[in-house]
Image (spheres, rainbow, N blue to C red):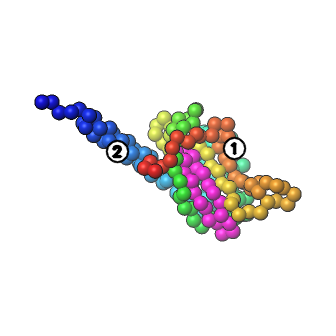
Amino acid sequence: MSRPKLPTACLLLILLGLLSGCGFSREQKRAEVAAERIHQSLREGNYDTIYKEAGPGFTNVTSSSQFSEMMAGMREQLGLLKSASEIGYKVGVDTQNGRTHQVFFDLTFERGHANEMLVFTYTDKGDLLLFHLGIVPTNQPAPSGSADSNDSTSTIGPRSSQPQSTGNKPGN
């Protein structure tokens, strides 16, 4: 009498799912390590380091001096970065750059808080590079005469090809 093939097929599918989850975990960890390097550079005011380690999707939309000037203005407004707490992770797809890794943080500065989104893409060689950086202060009053409280938002990276989310953190 032959054994049913369905349980074997189910077992293989479960095993494949677990193995692919390990890949996502490794990729998430790589994105988190890259984010920590960025946060360390922000704390130290090393904006050139962030720019030099970013990918072309980031560097093609702003110059190093513009980026440094924007980050210095944010630091002047909010003070030093004190902490960065991860609040989310998503794997997305960009039509031109393939798979993206989006890491979301709650940032605490000396004089305020902000939400941050870092988006990373892979190069052909497997390097993880910054593709998009967005920092939005969450407790800043609106500038006088303006209805928009996000005038101090720092967003660098392609706007026309924002990554599309394909799901939440694996396991959620």
Q: Quadrant of residue 131?
A: top right
Q: Position of residue 112 (x, y in %)?
A: 68, 66
Which residue sits at x=52%, y=40%? 166
Which residue sits at x=69%, y=68%? 111
Which residue sits at x=46%, y=39%? 126
* Residue that label 1 marks: 62
Q: How many marks?
A: 2
Looking at this rendering, what residue extends furthest in the left direction? 1
Left/right of residue 62 with respect to residue 28 in the rendered view: right
Nearer to me, 54 or 10: 10
Question: Which quadrant, please, contains the N terminus?
Answer: top left
Q: Quadrant of residue 78?
A: bottom right
Q: Position of residue 73 (x, y in %)?
A: 73, 58
Q: Position of residue 83 (x, y in %)?
A: 57, 65
Instruction: Specify the principal SS of the magenta part.
Output: strand
Left/right of residue 98 with respect to residue 11 in the rendered view: right
* Residue that label 2 marks: 18
Nearer to me, 137 or 62: 137
- The verdict on residue 102 being magenta is yes
Image disc number at residue 2: none
Left/right of residue 103 with respect to residue 112 in the rendered view: left
Q: Residues within 10 Å of mark 2 (few under 14, many from 20)?
A: few
Q: Amino acid type of disc 2?
A: Leu
Q: Quadrant of residue 8?
A: top left
Chain part drawn in magenta? 101-121
Q: Amino acid type of disc 1?
A: Thr
Residue 35 can be seen, yes or no: no
Q: Earlier in the sequence, mark 2 or mark 1?
A: 2
SS for callout 1: loop
Residue 113 can be seen, yes or no: yes
Which residue sits at x=57%, y=36%? 94
